Amino acid sequence: MEIREQLNDQLLDKTSKKCLLDSEIYKQRALMYSQMEGAISVLSDMQADKSYLYKSGAASELGLNCKENPVEIDSIWEEEMLKKIHPDDRLKKYIHELRFFKLLESMNKEIRTDYSVVSKIRMADKNGEYKWVKHRMFYTYSPYNGKLRFALCLYNIALEMSSIPEFLIINMAKGEVIVKDRLDYKSILSPRELEVLKWIGEGYASKQIADILSISINTVSRHRQNILEKLKVKNSTQAFKDSFY
C-alpha cells in the first residue's frame, strides 16, 4: 500500500460521531502563525477532508502562486507544497507523519497536545533550486470523538541548515526530545535499493517498478525485503515496516 494511502486511512475521520470544534477558530490560528512567523501555514481538517494554505513572503520565495489567502484545497494533501519537496524528503516526511500519528495514538489523550514534530526538508524555490526548509507539525484531537481533527504544518525557509534536526518528536511542555532520527538512507541502502525506495515513495507498485528499472518483479520483491531488514537493523520503528506493505 502506498504510504499516502495508508496515511489517508489513518488520518481521515470517518466516525459517525462528529467533532463540534469550530474550524474558523483554527483557521484564524493558522493565519496568525503565517503572519507572525513569515511561515507558509497549512491547516488540514480531517473531518471535512480539506486543507487551507495561508501564504507569507516565503510563498513567493518558493514560487507558490497563491492568488487567494487562504487557498482552499479539497483534500488533506497540499499538492502545490508537496510537489516542491525533494522526492527523498517527501518520502521521509510521509513516514515520519505516520510514526508521529502512531505515537500519539498510543498516548493518553490528555497529553497529546504536548507533542510536535520538527524536521528539515529540501524544497524547490522560485528558481528551481532546492532550499532547506524548517517543517513543524502539530495535531489537534477532538474532545467529542477522540479522533484527530486538525493538523497544522508550518514551513519556514531555514536560517542555517546545520542547526535544524533531521527529524524530532518533542515534548513541548517539558522541552524534551522523545524521538530523534538520524537515519541516513544513503549509508544504509545500496544504489539499487535507493532507486526502489524512491519509486515506492512515489506510489508505484512492484510490477511498475520492475518495468521502470527493467528488472524482474521477484528482484523488486527481494529489494523491498532487504530495505525492510536494513531499516529494522538500524533501530527504525515499526512504522517503516508498515509503510512498505
Image: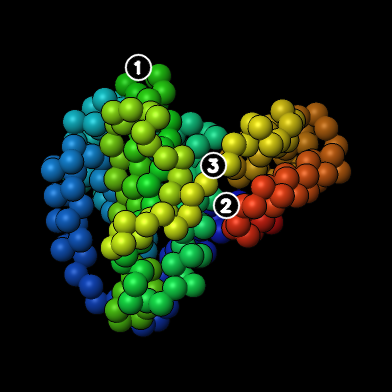
Image quadrant holding the N terminus, namely bottom right
Q: What element does badge 1 sit on?
A: loop
Specify the amino acid type for callout 3.
Answer: Arg
Report the residue at 13% width, 42% height from top.
Answer: 35
Quickly name the residue at label 1. Answer: 127
Report the residue at 28% width, 63% height from top.
Answer: 173
| Distance from Cα at disc 3 to Cα at disc 1 | 29 Å
Residue 63 found in image quarter: top left
Whichever of callouts 3 and 1 sits on the residue coming sooner in the sequence is 1
Q: How many residues crowd mark 2 within 10 Å: few (<14), some (14–19), many (20+)? A: many
For the residues carrying marks 3 and 1, which lies nearer the camera in this image? Answer: 3
Q: Residue 17 in the image: state x and y as whole percent.
A: 36, 82
Specify the amino acid type for callout 1.
Answer: Asn
Q: How many residues crowd mark 3 within 10 Å: few (<14), some (14–19), many (20+)? A: few
| Distance from Cα at disc 2 to Cα at disc 3 | 20 Å
Quickly name the residue at label 2. Answer: 3
Residue 140 seen: no
Using the image, determine if residue 27 lies above or below residue 199: below
For the residues carrying marks 2 and 3, which lies nearer the camera in this image? Answer: 3
